[in-house]
Image (spheres, helix red, strand yellow):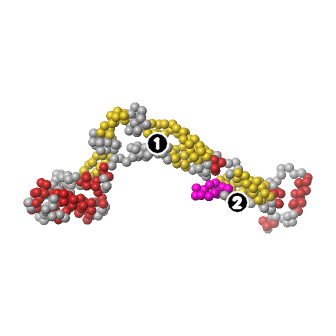
Amino acid sequence: MAAAKDFYKTLGVDRKATADDIKAAYRKLARKYHPDLNPGDKVSEEKFKEINEAYAVLGDPKKKEQYDRGPETFEWPGGAGEWAGAGPGYGAGAPGGGFEYDFGFGDIFSELFGGAARQHMAPQKGADLYTEMEVTFQEAFAGTTRPVSLSRESVCTVCGGAGASQVTKCPRCKGTGKLQTKRGFFSTVQTCPDCGGTGQKAVKLCPSCKGSGKKVTAETVSVKIPAGVDNGSMLRLRGLGNAGAGGGPAGDLRIKIKVHPHPFFRREGENVYLEVPVTVGEAALGAKIEVPTPDGKAIMKLPAGTGGGQRFKLKGKGFTSPKGGRGNLYVDINIVLPKHIGDRARAALSELESAYGENPRKDILH
């Protein structure tokens, strides 16, 4: 027969300790050795069982009185001289023939975890809404403000989202919004399924929203399109989605941007590309030419001897970058010939042809 256990020693108190002293000692040790605070620690798990065994007896005035008359005479559930149970919840049908006892472990469990067992269901954010908006190349470059019409769920203004014009305390959870279940020495808390954690039940539904707490409303909002948006960009407007549940915030409105292509400009990231036609004389002799940019016209200096396909950079004439600064405008030169060549032009071109002196293709021919 195993030796009787000294429960006073297990809890670290002497035999003259008061009920409050015993309870305080137990709470201190429970916080220290609770399995949820020491995951995977078998030593702490066994220690937690031992202090629960001790408190199950010393925390019960009748069992404590019997134990104080002598552990050897105490009526152990599993036979004289040894403890059959391993903590709260060892019932009559449990291994070892233990008995049930309850010493308010749910309150201690709440203390250990910051009162989380007293919380109702967390508020839920409303669903997001999605739409598309088409903008021109110029609007994407400079930014603009556009109206957007949408239909969304909003909180009912009549009942304030409660869904009822008259409510009463939920009979199942007694208005707490939670249901507590004890299994062994663990106490679990779940949201009351009848009231959804609100602690209230509707007696009379709201005549405006028919109990949903929400109403679909149509509205038009003004949306600012920032400069530099690209095709496929997604704008997010917080709080313009559907209403939340349980006092949660509304969802967001997400707008996908579609940018129409430009007839002359081609965009790649923050940079813009443009093909500019020039005359033979401008390319050969050099010139100052006027070229378009996304934010107006600019004067570009064309050096003498410019070749077809040559690329020039106009710094800072591209799109605004989200990281700050501007992209560049790259100008590709395209030398064009006149559609109609008269005698004077023909003579001038012949004279220009003689200026080459040699075949410009000789390198690729050899």
Q: Residue at x 47, y 36 (%)?
A: 216
Quadrant containing the N terminus in the rendered view:
bottom left
Q: Which residue is drawn at 64% across and 54% down?
A: 319
The residue to which callout 1 is attached is 242
Identify the image quadrant of residue 13. bottom left
Dot 2 amino acid type: Lys
Q: On the rendered structure, is 322 left or right of 7?
A: right
The residue to which callout 2 is attached is 313
Identify the image quadrant of residue 54. bottom left
> Magenta residues, as a range?
317-327
Q: Which mark is residue 228?
A: none
Q: Do the residues labelled 1 and 2 touch (CB within 8 Å)?
A: no
Please state the total of marks drawn on the protein image. 2
The one of 265 and 178 positioned closer to us in this rendering: 178
The one of 252 and 338 positioned closer to us in this rendering: 252
Q: Is residue 214 above or below residue 350?
A: above
Q: Residue at x 35, y 47 (%)?
A: 121
Q: Percent position (x, y) of residue 40?
A: 30, 62
